[in-house]
Amino acid sequence: MDIDISGWILEFLLRQNSIDDKIVNDLIRVLPLPNNNPRFIKSLILRKVESDIEKGTISKCTIEFLEQIEELDHRVGTTEVSEAMKAAYSAVSMHRTIKSTEDISGDKSKKYASAVKRILSARICEMEKSDVGLVQDGLVHWVHDIEGGVLDTDVLRKFKELDVFKIIRGYVNDAKEKLGPSFLELACESILKDDALSEAMDLDEVSELRRAPTDVHEASGAHEVSKVNYKSKDNASTDDANDEASRAHEVSKHSNQSKESAPTDNAGAYSKGDVYSYVEASRAHEVSKPGNQSKDNSPTDDVGANGKGNG
């Protein structure tokens, strides 16, 4: 299967919460994965975070997933971290730190100092050096206070009253909204609404069905839709030639660039122009079939399955 098409299918399925993780995982194992597509990778990581939420578990991997998304966004030019993401990262970090001390006996200050050093100190230090805006000031101050031997019980009490899963779910919903619809959803919507695009893709029946008059009448106590009469294509060779020229012009008008593969260069929302760009490229070039692709060094392990470092 073409790697772009595979990516579109997987991206769409990853965004459907009604589809079980097992089905998605089975497809991930057999379909070629577009590792150079930030939107697909982000959708995959967000699905993993959602799986953690549904299972009621927050692990070290949840922290790493959020860091991977921030790094991915930064790589494609999104330098400002949303408040929803900052809140989620702070909530997950504090949750993991506090949970890791619950079964440890001894002085509270020492317990938290040990947990912070193990889970957060190196992360916070590196983020401060790199000027990464992922952490809220409150989390930074909390970490520094505990490292200095100061344990603010009021902060702990207020945090324990928070619904951490609600905060993380709020971020996931915000991130998915900013991603916009999947490529397949946008393509279907565009085709159904745009005669020029459906004709450019040789989907004449779609545009004809949309233009044809549909008579609705009542019969036997129920509404029946009369059959749509498709217009005759006889003696239309001249019109077909004109339509083809008009079709090519319309596609090129909506695309300022020619691409040999689908647009996968950013993690932002797809636009209608992306659909036109792919149509133009597809008509001009036959998409080469991808070879076997390595899945190493990419966050493409099973949805809902955390790697090393669980706990």
Image (cartoon, rainbow, N blue to C red):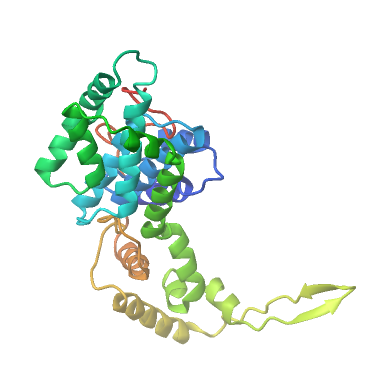
Number of numbered markers: 0
Q: Can the viewer see residue 289 in this picture? A: no
Q: Which of 172 and 239 is in front in this view?
A: 172
Instruction: From this view, report whether residue 247 is shown above or below residue 160.
Output: below
Q: Nearer the viewer, residue 174 or 272?
A: 174
Q: Residue at x 45, y 81 (%)?
A: 240
Expressed as whole percent of the image width and height from the top left, the position of residue 85 reads 32, 49
Q: Which of 260 and 135 is in front in this view?
A: 135
Expressed as whole percent of the image width and height from the top left, the position of residue 261 reads 29, 57
Q: Can the viewer see residue 153 in this picture? A: yes
Expressed as whole percent of the image width and height from the top left, the position of residue 3 reads 35, 47
Q: Residue at x 21, y 29 (%)?
A: 150
Residue 210 as seen in the image, left or right of residue 146: right
Instruction: From this view, report whether residue 29 is shown above or below residue 137.
Output: above
Q: Which residue is drawn at 25% across and 44% down?
A: 138
Residue 210 as seen in the image, left or right of residue 303: right
Q: Quadrant location of residue 211?
A: bottom right
Q: Which residue is drawn at 49% across and 33% down?
A: 56
Q: In which quarter of the image is the N terminus?
A: top left
Q: In which quarter of the image is the C terminus?
A: top left
- Furthest toward the left, the residue is 129
Expressed as whole percent of the image width and height from the top left, the position of residue 98 reads 35, 28
Residue 292 as seen in the image, left or right of residue 117: right
